[in-house]
Amino acid sequence: MRIRRLVTLLVGVNVLLIAIGWIVVPPPTTKPGSGLRVGLVFDIGGKNDKSFNEAAYRGLERARTELGVDVTYIEPSEGADRESALRTLAARGLDLVIGVGFIFGPDLEHLAAKFPAVKFAGIDYSPSEGVGTIANLAGLRFREHEGSFVVGAIAGMLTRTRTVGFVGGMKIPLIRKFEAGYEAGVLHTCPTCRVVSAYAGTEPKAFADPSLGEELAAAQYGQGADLIFHAAGNTGDGVFAAARERGLRAIGVDSDQYDNAPCCVVTSMVKAVDVAVVDIIKDVAAKRFRPGIHELGLAERGVGFIADERNRDLLPLEVVEQARVIAAQIVAGAIQVPDR
Amino acid sequence: MRREVATVGIALLAALAIGSALILVAGRSPGHVWFAMLARTLGDPYLFGQILYKATGLALTGLAVALALDAGLFNIGAEGQLTAGVLACAVVGQALPAGTPAILAIPACTLAAALAGAAIGVTIGALRVTRGAHEVITSIMLNAIVVGVALWIGNAVLFRGGATRGGAIVAGAELPPLGLAGSAANASIVIAALCVGGMWWLRARTTWGAAWRAVGRDPAAARSVGIGVGRVQILAMLGSGALAGLAATNFVLGHKHAFEEGLGRGTGLLGISAALLGRLHPLGVALAAILLGFLSVGGLAVNDLVPKELTEMLQGVVLLSVAVAVPWVRRRWAQ
């Protein structure tokens, strides 16, 4: 009866592995914290996407180590699990549940009404049609158009062909904010320049299609663009690939994307998602949670651009200085940046 | 029968061991993770409901794959048949006049879903029988075609505003939720249960079942005893497609109440796993669907302990273990 022997063996292996786990791995310690419990649900891409989600994760980790809050998170693998994930955390009675990405909007509104004792926050949240302020829901938004204006101004100063490109992900008002600010920024420093634009699609997967991104970028470089700004999530990897191949330049988005193509990434328009996450957690901890939309722009350091020793060769100091002046003018209100 | 149970039991034990090893590598205690997975899903009515919701869809697509495979055809196309069902179900539900009573609306939408799936299934069966086109190739191609056509129709006529969601079905067509803390589990679980029972009866108690299983075992032998092999295969694909299409009731009538791009996506492909893990037996398929649903929801529940990639791998490990265990046990069973 070799079958019986195998079953005995398998049971033995299982018991052994579980026993090893019990002995070797220390039980999860519950550190004495502030007692605040925070949960976060990532968008498709997950916490290690080197971009938007990862920035949120950094914020969550900082809140854990610096503020001592109890954190937990879920990475849904498909769209249908998003609501499920938010609800799971809300049902555990956490103090704050954060959804990372505009796509959580309707789910957050729905659940905020169902769980009035839980506070909700949505990164890039914009209210659905006809929905007003909900008492336990905060939307953390960025004035991406301001940051995009500054990198657009940089692009206008750097282009030699007087043509620059823009590659967007999903065609939605949020991404249009990037495009509008960028376009205005380019024309601010180079009124005779041309901006060629393209979007990867009209569904969420437009943010996750690098090969399409490469095609779009190749077409724009082919039309004479020598610099492309992308606001397309993972699709942007294709833009960097096209830039690398031709030795032409690109501008990153959300996080510092220099590492994606050190040859070519002039700068990145960064969104301080981590700062927003830490701030909302601090607000809840201090019992000064404010519902409604919180907007973070250049003035609040919610958006900005990267200028450090790594990209110095690609981004001359005088251009950086000019860009800082323009940023200051936006903060002061001397420059009005369009957002659509 | 006892052999099948032993096979799956051995495979699950092996999968559990591999899963434990992976969890150890990830730096966690396997006992702790397994316990958390059980306690959090079964202890929470909402997550328990989510398991039932996933299992309902999977049981139907699993039965679809099992029926075809029983008749010797590998229907990879449950995904496309389900998508066709989702589209037809939602379009009919939306087109019905407001105020249509449930007694008319629900059967109409259910029938639309089954017919749409059956139409795709019968196409695959007919191509196989009359033209000799291999069903794996045609069903994979039809998956891509149906998903593309559904999205195109959605974009052209159904989707409203910027959303990838069509108009709502009439209220009468909505299947009531099971009420598990607002989870998506709904009355379509009754449809799934009826199909499991019906399949069991057809397969074990009727000459129909005997005929399609004979065709599956050895078409030449079946032909020699006077079974119309081609006819049986076409009918099996018709039934298979209808079952996959019926899974749409879970997603459209029971949960989303509209056509949405990507609704039910993956359920058709995972149905293949449910069929193989359930060893083609209707009851086995139902249990396999519950297990796969548990793994997917349980993965979410312990996401703070282990990365999601690990729990996704676990579904593959389970299936691989079954594939390895089947010939191993078969060779040694008689000894």
Image: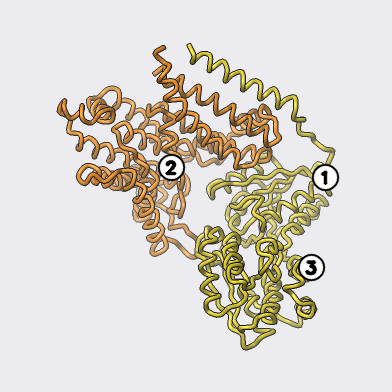
Up-down: is A54 above or below A265?
above
Q: Nearer the viewer, mark 2 or mark 1?
A: 2
Q: Which chain carries label 1?
A: A
Q: How crowded is mark 2: few (under 14 residues within 10 Å), some or many (20 or more)?
A: some
Disc 2 target residue? B269
Disc 1 target residue? A68
Up-down: is B274 above or below A177?
above
Colour orange, chain: B
In the visual, does B124 lie left or right of B52? Answer: left
Circle 3: residue type: Asp
Circle 1: residue type: Gly
Near-viewer residue (A267 or B154): A267
Q: How crowded is mark 3: few (under 14 residues within 10 Å), some or many (20 or more)?
A: few
Q: Mark 2 lies on which chain?
A: B
Quadrant of the rendered structure where residue A106 is? Answer: bottom right
Gap in angstroms between the C-alphas marked 1 and 3: 31 Å
Instruction: Report which colour depicts chain A.
Output: yellow
Secondary structure category for the residue under label 1: loop
